[in-house]
Image (cartoon, helix red, strand yellow):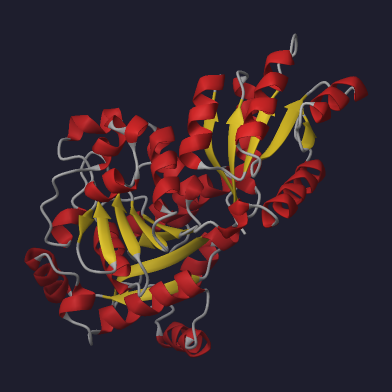
Amino acid sequence: MSLTFLVLSKNEEAANELRVALTAAQNTKLLAHCNSFERLLSDITLLKPSAVIVVLSQDDPEKEFALIKKVIAGHPEIAVITASSDTSSGLILRSMRSGAHEFLPLPVVADEFRTVVDRVRELSLHGDSGTKKHGRVIAVFSGKGGSGVSFIATNLAASMSVSTLLADLNLQAGDAASFLGIDPKYSVVDFVHNRARLDDSLINSFLCVHSSQLSLLAAPPEAHEAEDVKPQDVTEILHLLRQKFECIILDLPHTFDSSTVAALDLADDILIVLTLDIPGIRSANRAMKVFNRLKYPKTKVHVIVNRWGKNIDVQLQKVEAHLDEKILGLIPNDYRKVIDSINLGQPLVESEPASKITLELKRIASLVFDGVDPTSTQRRKGLLGMFGRQSQTGTGALHLSPMMDKA
C-alpha cells in the first residue's frame, strides 16, 4: 500500500531532508510541503493524506502541539508524526500527549525512518486510508526532444483497459490533445485557478473525455500560462486525480524543471524513451544519472527504445550495459503509420489494432501496469536473438566507446 504524506516545516533544510527520505523510500509519496498552519489544514481536507509530519519549533513547540490536537480531532484516520533534532524524553512525552502517533529524530536515520513508516502503514491498514482508491502513475520522459514521448504516452493511455487519464504536463508546448483529436476548453491552469473550490463535479468539468475509458488533462493553451502552475500544484492535482482514475499516464517535457521533477517524484514508474543514436543514448544516460541523484529506486525506471529497426546497427547489449538498465521494449519504426495517426488525431492502437507498433505498445502497457507479462521470457529471448544477429564491427556501426564515456 502506498502512503501519502504532508510535511509542515518552517525549516527548509528539515523539509528537504524529509522530501529526500520520502522519495527514496518504497511506496511513500510526499504530497506537499506546508509552511503555515492554515495551509496544512487546508491541504489535509483537500488531499486526504495517510500521514502528516510536523517539524517542531526549536524555541516553543506549543503551537504545533495545539495544531496536532486539532488535526487528530478533525481527522482521526490520519497518522501524525512529530520530528525534531531535540530528542529529549521531555519533548517526546509532550509530543505523545498532544496525540502524535510517532516521533522522528532529525537528522533522519534510515532505520528509524523505516520503522516510523512501517508503524504508519500498520495504522493506515486499520483506517479509512487503506481503502482509498489510489491509481498508478506512469511517467513517460525523454532527455531529448523529438524522441516520440507524446506519441508513446498517448498510445499507452489508449491501450489501458482500466479508467485512465492522460495528463499533458508539457506545460509550455504540450499538444497531447491533438494526438487524441480533442479541442480542450479547459486545462491544468483551470485546476490551479480554482483550487479552493475543487469538488468532484468541477474536476470532471476540467477534463476532456476521449472514450469511456480515457480522459485528458490538457496542457495550458498559451505558453506563458505555465508560470501559473507551481510544483506543489502538480503534486496536489495528480494526487486528487489518482483517486478518480486507476491509471494516470504523464506526458512530460524533456527538461528537469521543478514541475517535471514533482511529477517524476509522484510517479510509480518512469518510462525513459530513447532513440538509438548518439544524442539519444547520451541524453538517456544523463537522465539516469539525475534519477540516481534523486534517489529513485531502480525498479521505478524502465527503458523504451523508439523507432527500432533491424537495420539499425547498434549493439543493444552495449546500450544496456552503458545505461545499467535492461531494455523493456522496442517500438518498431513505421514513419507513415505514425504520422497518419497523428494527423488524423487518432491513437495508432485504435486505428491500426493489428500493427506491430500497437502490439508492442500494448505489451509494454500490460507489463508496466499489471507487473505481469506472459510473453516476457519469450520476448527476452527474442531480444537476445537480435543481439546475436547484430554486427559487432560492421561498416557504419554506431560504437558506444569511447564517445559515450564522455556522456
Q: Quadrant of the N terminus?
A: bottom right
In the foreground, 130 or 187: 130
Residue 310 in view in this figure: no
Is 109 placed left or right of 218 in the picture?
Answer: right
Task: Residue at 14% x, 69% y: name it.
Answer: 346
* 273 up-or-down from 170: above or below: below
As drawn, which residue projects farthest toward the right?
Answer: 89
* 158 up-or-down from 258: above or below: below
In the foreground, 194 or 388: 194
Q: Position of residue 189 (x, y in %)?
A: 25, 36
Task: Residue at 32% x, 51% y: name it.
Answer: 144
Residue 40 occupies quadrant: top right
Is 279 placed left or right of 240 in the picture?
Answer: left
Count of residue discs = 0
Task: Residue at 64% x, 54% y: name it.
Answer: 26
As drawn, which residue projects farthest toward the top?
Answer: 59
As drawn, which residue projects farthest toward the front?
Answer: 73
Is 258 placed left or right of 308 in the picture?
Answer: right
Q: Position of residue 378 (x, y in %)?
A: 49, 90
Q: Position of residue 93 (x, y in %)?
A: 87, 26
Q: Position of residue 341 (x, y in %)?
A: 13, 70
Task: Residue at 40% x, 83% y: name it.
Answer: 390
Residue 251 in view in this figure: yes
